[in-house]
Image (spheres, coloured by chain):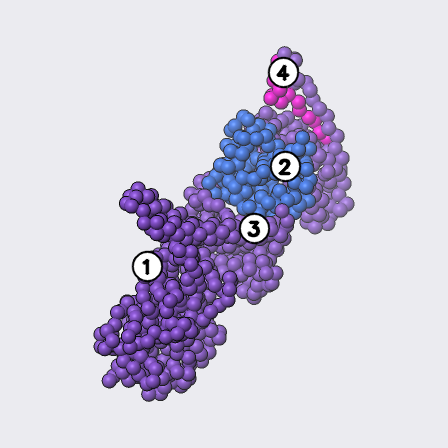
Amino acid sequence: MTKTILSVDDSKSIRDMIGFTLEPRGFTVIGAADGVEGLAKLGSQPVNLVVCDLNMPNMNGIEMVRKMRADRRFDGIPIVMLTTEAQKEKMMEAKQAGATGWLVKPFDEAKLVAVVNKLLG
Amino acid sequence: MSGNSIRDTFFEECEELLEALVEGLSQMEESPGDTEVVNAVFRAVHSIKGGAGAFGLDELVNFAHTFETVMDKVRGNEIVVTGDLMALFHRSGDHLSDLVVAARDETVANQETEAGLIKELEGHLGPDHAEEEFSFDALTLDFDADSSAAIVIDDLEGSQAQDHEAERRFGIAFTPTRALYENGHEPLLLFDALAELGTLSVEMNMAQLPDFDAFDPAEPCISWTLDLLTQETETTLHEVFEFVEGLCVIDISVTEVPAHTQVEPADGELAPPAFDPPEETPMPDATSADSVPDPAQAEETASPGTGPAASVAGKEPRGPKATLRVDLDRVDRLINTVGELIINQAMISQRIEELDLPTVAHLTNELEAYKLLARDIQEGVMAIRAQPVKPLFQRMSRIVREASDATGKKARLVTVGDSTEVDKTVIERLADPLTHMVRNAVDHGLEKSEIRAAAGKDRMGTIRLSAAHRSGSVFIEIADDGAGLNRERILEKAIEKNLVPADAELSEPEIDNLLFLPGFSTAGTVSSLSGRGVGMDVVKNAVQALGGRVSIASQPGKGTTFTIILPLTLAVMDGFVISVSDQTMVIPISSILETIRPKPKDIHVIGTDSHVVSVRGSYVPIVDVAENLGLGKIRSDKEVGILLLVSTETQGLTALRVSAIHDQRQVVIKSLESNYAAIPGVSAATILGDGKIALILDPEELIKLAQPSASDQIAQHARMELRHA
């Protein structure tokens, strides 16, 4: 069964980029523009991995991670935070909220693929 | 989906983000201290950087990063925003916009500007900047596939002595909690990461495994003991576990230290094992990190949720309204179809009228309702193309800034009514004329600060840009509070350039309008700003191409105001249905000042073939529409016809003679140029209710046709002689 990756990012180009990179490698990529939409997508179909931006309108990445981790249905789904954020405290905050990993933008294809492969075994 | 279309999406996004940035910056000035505004600015820069990184646009990333870092300090209240800093932010925003354009067009932005800006921005970061940068890089490595290699390189560079460093043996006890699994972590991945650091052996401990009956699949019951032989420091090991800290019990201890490592105790990088007292076995909670004496680690546990940046990010600003991005072609197709619907509705109405049915009142009501609905649909569809002038106005703040820098005149831009919506095409085509006019307003309109001060004015000049809907048109005003037009100088110049006869006596508005003549330029010297080969005539042509007009009003000492009046939409217009000879035509209502049914005695013949009409004491030249379109002549003696008084910018008041006016209605504009060819004096065509095609006249062009440039001055002379007769 193909694995589904949910890309949550307010930037369509980033979502497209992730789809463009991962879909040829056999993953299904679905997108959401913010945390609210992300949670809705999570609730409506099985997702194996979430790649989530930090800075988003409506509901930011950390908030979304918190909400995800508070919901038993989403237990065990790895969340990779994707951001250009340079501060350590942001990363720690995301971790505290329950993020699984961290990928710093700008990322190249190889990095993204490696992280996804690693987390989805 | 191709890489290129993603790229296009990125640049579209950039435009929106840059708009948000400019808006945010001006809001920062209006309401300093509003963290949400600062956050919005930060996010705009940040998102540009993020996207740019994904496309390998390094120049853009570099600059955005510096900009973002300073914004972040502002966000964290570490930097106080001063007027100077705001100006720097504005300039940085401008440069960021240049970089985006450069990246899109694959050119290079001004590197001198960039170097200067980066230096200035970094000046606000303080001396610890470089260090921060480093720790940021090191941190990102953990989740990077090639992290171990990078770390090794870093360490080697840090101290060459480690080259010959012998390995140390670490014992690691690792007991995951339930939360570790719930957060999507996988112990195997951690072990893989450790294995990359050296030689790892893993031992699984199943002592806690309960009886089958008591087994809870969600409850972890396996722990591991690991043995790692590595050159790495303990800090590096902790970094591997960084993201699972608090989610597991972890104990790292050095079990075997080669004797000669003790020789180099001075190297802080080595993190002496003595700092990690084994008796302080961490508890299975979030405090476990406390047992790690590394200062960086201690800091990170202290900061979550407490930093100013974090508290800001916790509550995101109200999101933008939900929008839908649609291909413009689709909208235009819809607009065309609705145009057909309007025509169809008019046809049905006319056909039913022709049937002459005996008082079918209901049908009339339904028809009326149909008409209203069609109008509603049309308005709704037009609204899709309508966009606020805000982004356009925002761009002008940069123009004012640049013009102000170049001329040394202090100027501020005030915008009014920037939520006014105008057709997208109008906005696009207005950008250049507006830029030119705003630039002119600073360059020519405003006086130098000293002169202003001497005149008792604010040293800083104001350019006021306003937009409003008024009686079915859009009014855009560009006003300066400068010295006003120097009419003497304008006239002098016009005479010098042979644009008007030396003895011409012109009224004030006529002098003002000389500015719009081709080849006119008031600047004594060609300044770097205004002297770019385009004059106000280009502005006027651009506005006229949009079916609008420009006018000037000026008061000595108080300033000059240019007003651009534009139709609300380019797709439909209100027009008079007229007949010219036996042809049905349409003339835009917006250009008609009044209609006159003249008495034969009001019409006078001048010279051999020119006619004028006296309107309230002044003489207005008559232009026969039929004659100018080659449809024969309406003989003035018997058939006086109807005169439509139009005001044109170049020729002043003129009366157009037509045979009759039939109706006033909204017509759908169909381009003649794209379907047939451009005809002088005719701007477009439309389809009338009876299905017939009617030409839409362009009064300005028509009058120009009637007065070829050679006879221009004669006509003007004649007009003036009459006026003074």
- Please provide percent x and percent y for residue B308: 46, 43
The colour chain B appears in is: purple
> Would residue B224 be counted in the magenta stretch?
yes
The three-letter amino acid code for the residue at tag 2 is: Thr
Which mark's residue is nearer the viewer, 2 or 4?
Answer: 2
Pinpoint residue B79: horizontal percent, then vertical percent. 46, 52
Circle 3/circle 1 CB separation < 8 Å: no
Q: Secondary structure at mark 1?
A: strand
Q: Chain of mark 2?
A: A
Q: Nearer the viewer, residue B582 or B128?
A: B582
Is residue B59 visible in the rendered image? The answer is: yes
Asked where in the image residue B476 lies, by quadrant, the reply is bottom left
The answer to whether marks 4 and 1 sit on the same chain is: yes
Please state which of the two labelled residues, at mark 3 or mark 1, is closer to the viewer: 1
Q: Which mark is residue B215?
A: 4
User: Subunit of mark 1?
Assistant: B
Q: In the figure, residue B369 lies in which quadrant?
A: top left
Q: Amino acid at mark 3?
A: Thr
Residue at label 3? B9
Count of numbered tags: 4
Q: Is residue B318 above or below residue B624?
A: above
Q: Residues within 10 Å of mark 3 (few under 14, many from 20)?
A: some
Q: CA distance from mark 3 to mark 1?
A: 45 Å
Identify the mark nearer the N-term, 4 or 3.
3
Question: Which chain comes out blue in the rendered image?
Answer: A
Secondary structure of residue under mark 4? loop
| Residue tagged 2 | A28
